[in-house]
Amino acid sequence: MNTIQATGLTESSVSRREVGHLAVWSVTSAKPGNGVEMLRDGSPDTFWQSDGLQPHLINIQFQRKMPLLELHMHVDYKLDESYTPSRVSVRAGHTYQDLKEVRVVDLEEPSGWVVIPLTSESWPHEPLKAFYLQLAVLANHQNGRDTHIRQVKIWSARTDSNKTLPCSMATTQMSMYSTVR
C-alpha cells in the first residue's frame, strides 16, 4: 500500500511527454455538465463528478501500446471535501477484460497534483507498456459517495529517433542525401 502526497507538477524531465490527447477517454458515470471532457479541459476550476455507486472508473484507451511512466491527477480536498478520493487504484492491460492492478494509492487530504508512478518498483526506469489504463476511485474522504477529479494527465516515455540511427544526420555528407528531389 502506498501513501502519496500531492506534489507540484514539474516539467523537469525531458525524457517524457503528455499523451492523454492520443487516447479515447470514458467514465462509468457523470453528473450533467461535469462529464469526461472536464478531465482534459486544462482548467483546475472544472471537474468530473461521478454519479452512482463506487468504484468510479476513468477508462483511458490508446490505439497502440504506449510506454507509460506516470499518471498525474489534480484533486483539491479544500474545495471538494467529501468528494475527494481517499483511495485509488490504477489498472493496466491490453483490453478491459485483462486489466491488472498496477498501484493502489491512499491519499490524505490531497490538494494539487498527485503523481502516481506507473513503473515497477524494481525497475523504476522501465515504462509500463499498455493499450488500456483505468483509474478506479475506491473510496472518498468522509465516506463520500460521488467523486470530483479536476484533471488527469498521462505521461509517456519520449522516444528519441536519433538513438535508433547508427550514424548522425548532422554531417554535411549525410545532409546532402536527407531530402528527395
Image (cartoon, grey):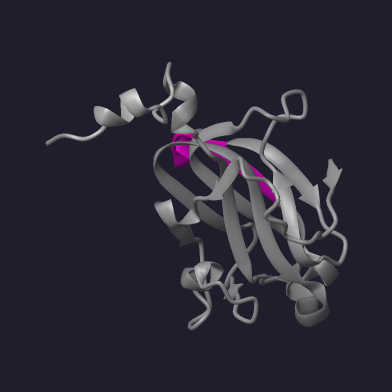
Q: Is residue 134 magenta?
A: no
Q: In the displayed structure, would residue 84 be above or below residue 15? A: below
- The span picked out in magenta is 89-97
Along the viewing direction, whichever of 112 and 91 lies nearer the viewer: 112
Q: Is residue 84 left or right of residue 147?
A: right
Q: Is residue 95 magenta?
A: yes
Q: Is residue 174 left or right of residue 119?
A: left
Q: Is residue 21 left or right of residue 56?
A: left
> In the rendering, at what x and y percent does residue 158 appear?
53, 39
Quadrant assignment for the C terminus:
top left
Residue lying at the far top in this picture: please name it: 166
Residue lying at the far front in this picture: please name it: 172
Q: In the displayed structure, would residue 13 be above or below residue 39? A: above
Q: Which residue is painted at 79% across and 75% down in the image? A: 82
Residue lying at the far left in this picture: please name it: 181
Q: Which residue is painted at 48% across and 42% down in the image? A: 132
> In the rendering, at what x and y percent does residue 66 appear?
48, 37
Q: Which image quarter: residue 171? A: top left
> In the rendering, at what x and y percent does residue 81 appear?
80, 77
Along the viewing direction, whichever of 160 and 113 lies nearer the viewer: 160
Quadrant assignment for the N terminus:
top right
Q: Which residue is painted at 48% across and 82% down in the image? A: 32
> In the rendering, at what x and y percent does residue 110 appear?
82, 65
Count of numbered marks:
0
